[in-house]
Amino acid sequence: MSSSIPFERYDEEFLSLTEQVTSKLRPLDPQTSSSLPPTSHADLKMAHALLLQLDDLLKQMGLEARSCDDASTKRDLLGKVRVCKARLGNLREDYEAAKGFVDRMDLGLGKNGVGE
């Protein structure tokens, strides 16, 4: 069961990275923000870099899960990887929404895509 120890660390790192991405994207949520914070471009850049780190982490997690010898443990670990992939997909959607919001605001189109 030595595979569970690295996976605990992966879980902790995944949680930490997702929290960081969320904190960078929260001020750029078009549903709750009406203007851009002065750090919006830096926040987007950092969120993108964190998403790339999450991609790499998921690759490592998948490799670790697939190399597990115990079938039951392997199934559990692959299930965790699937959950993490789904969460990463949601974060990517949030990133794209924030990026679109920043782009529209930069063009003076307002948060709904029309001049305000």
Image: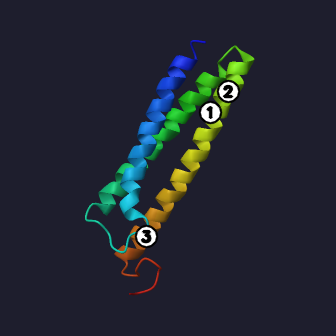
Task: Give residue 26's position: percent from left, percent from top.
Answer: 40, 58
- Residue located 49% across and 28% down the image: 10
Name the residue beneath numbered marker 2: 76
Lower sequence index among marks 2 and 3: 2
Of the 4 image quadrants, the one containing the N terminus is top right
Name the residue beneath numbered marker 3: 101
- Residue located 73% across and 20% down the image: 72
81 up-or-down from 18: above or below: above
Q: Residues within 10 Å of mark 2 (few under 14, many from 20)?
A: few
Q: Nearer the viewer, mark 2 or mark 3?
A: 2
Q: Amino acid at mark 3?
A: Phe
Task: Say which quarter of the image contains residue 12.
Answer: top left
Task: Give residue 29's position: percent from left, percent from top.
Answer: 43, 64
Mark on residue 80?
1
Of the 4 image quadrants, the one containing the C terminus is bottom left
Task: Say which quarter of the image contains residue 53.
Answer: top left
- Secondary element type, mark 3: helix
